Amino acid sequence: MSAELLSYAEAQAVVGSYVRGLARVDRSVERLSLAMASGRVLAKAIIADQDQPPFARSTRDGFACRAQEASSHTDLKIAGTTRAGETLPGPLPPGAAWEIMTGAPVPEHADAVVMIEHVLRNGDHVQLAASRTIQAGENIVAQGAQARAGDALIPVGTLLGAAQIALAATCGYAQIEAYTRPRVAILTTGDELVPVDQEPAPGQIRNSNAPMLAALVAAAGAEPRVLLTAADTAEALDAALGEAIGADMLLISGGVSAGKFDLVEPALARIAATFHFTGVRMQPGKPLVFGDVPRPDSPALPFFGLPGNPISSAATFQLFGTRVLAALSGNLESTPRFLAARLAQPTDRKAKPGLTRFLPGLCEFNFQDGGLPRVTTIPWHGSGDLPAFARSNCFVVVPENVGSLDEGMTVRILMI
Ligand code: AMP
Ligand code: MG
């Protein structure tokens, strides 16, 4: 099982091709009210039921007119008034203007709207101010300019956020069809772990990965199911894997390093797991394991064996696990979103090249230093340092081919 370690990029390529393979998997679908749709993945396209906008719409408070007539700066008679919500007015008589509010339909024969601030009003007449010009089309969005009735506006597989929900509402969707949320079994392993509500005896620690991974899974739009912690014995792991096998994805924390009680890989091998990789040249997260377990009546169960140190677990899940989870949710396009930032201090000069490193950092979005966010790395005592992790809001990426990064460099960061 112990194979050559992949580079970070190679490991991402393996996950990428696995994700493409998930395109063929059948996913179940449920109907949801629009109020519950945020963060879900669309299973049936949203179709425009009408043109958007459904009528030529004024974008200003002002006067609808013929641009050519208004441009002569002569008096135009105010032929009527239309507010947003009123039915289509008009037609606009020759030599006239029509008072109109933002969002209201533009009368027939009008081809521009002059802003109210740009006219001189004299009783029931208006005139374009001498200092102003107006062109046909100004301040009007033509019927159907944004979309035509029947257009597929949001494709299957789109992650729904506020903008997509607003568009679905505009098209009359009180309910949408979304893929069901994947259920993610979370199995923490380790003889030293006690639950959060217990006092650790000497040598024991509280299990922080279970709630952390549950939070990460929920944030990724899936349903976490935390299993009972497994002791570092073959029997305990076999039993726990039996519990996990019905899930859509499995996260195992701990027990994947090279220690005497790191028994997770042999336990997975006993249930005929395929290992896609068993280590990555990255820090934290080097012992990361990725594979899947065949099942007779359902698609293979993808799993990640996450190194037990909390920051390793979090980083590897964010970098790799979220991609598989998104694909299981029906969103095949998801990749980690790296941003550019300016590094405020050099990183550790003693570090050697050879591993892609992800250092906890604090990024400030005050856009100094040439318009980039500014990031500092947080001093930390290795990948178990939760107090340092809790002060950070991102990982700073140190590429594999360099040991350290210099102050002022543009670096890649991953927000967490
Ligand atoms: P392991 O990957 O099992 O060798 O664990 C590496 C380190 O992470 C050890 O110091 C463990 O005590 C710690 N660790 C493992 N699992 C957890 C967990 N669920 N919560 C907090 N720390 C853990
Ligand atoms: Mg362990």
Image (spheres, grey):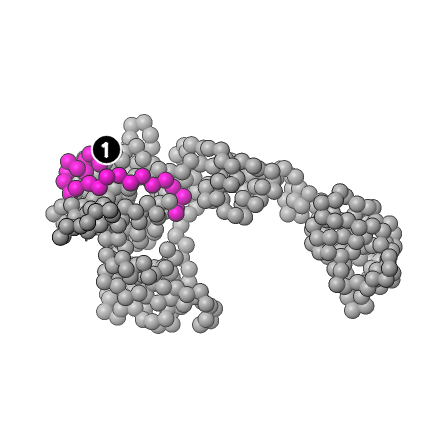
Taking the magenta stretch, the answer to whether it contains residue 238 is yes
* Residue 379 falls inside the magenta stretch: no
Which residues are drawn in magenta? 219-240
Q: Quadrant of residue 77?
A: bottom right
Residue in the foreground of this view, choosing between 302 and 345: 345
Q: Quadrant of the N terminus?
A: top left
Quadrant containing the C terminus in the rendered view? bottom left
How far across and how far down the image is residue 22, in percent?
38, 38
Residue lying furthest left: 260
Residue linked to disc 1 = 242
For the residue pair 361 and 390, the one nearer the viewer reads as: 390
The residue lying toward the viewer, choosing from 168 and 158, is 168
Q: Identify which residue is drawn at 22% across, 36% down.
A: 240
Q: Residue at x 29, y 27 (%)?
A: 296
Nearer to me, 19 or 4: 19
**As drawn, is 52 to the left or to the right of 14?**
right
Category of crowding for the residue at label 1, using alpha-carbon neighbours closer than 10 angstroms: few (below 14), some (14–19), many (at least 20): few
Residue 366 x %, y %: 45, 67
Q: Is residue 352 left or right of residue 167?
A: left
User: Residue at the spot x=32%, y=66% of the render?
Assistant: 377
Mark count: 1
Instruction: Write down the quadrant of residue 132 in the picture.
Output: bottom right
Picture coordinates of residue 160, whole percent (x, y)? 49, 44
Instruction: Label 1, secondary structure: give it.
Output: helix
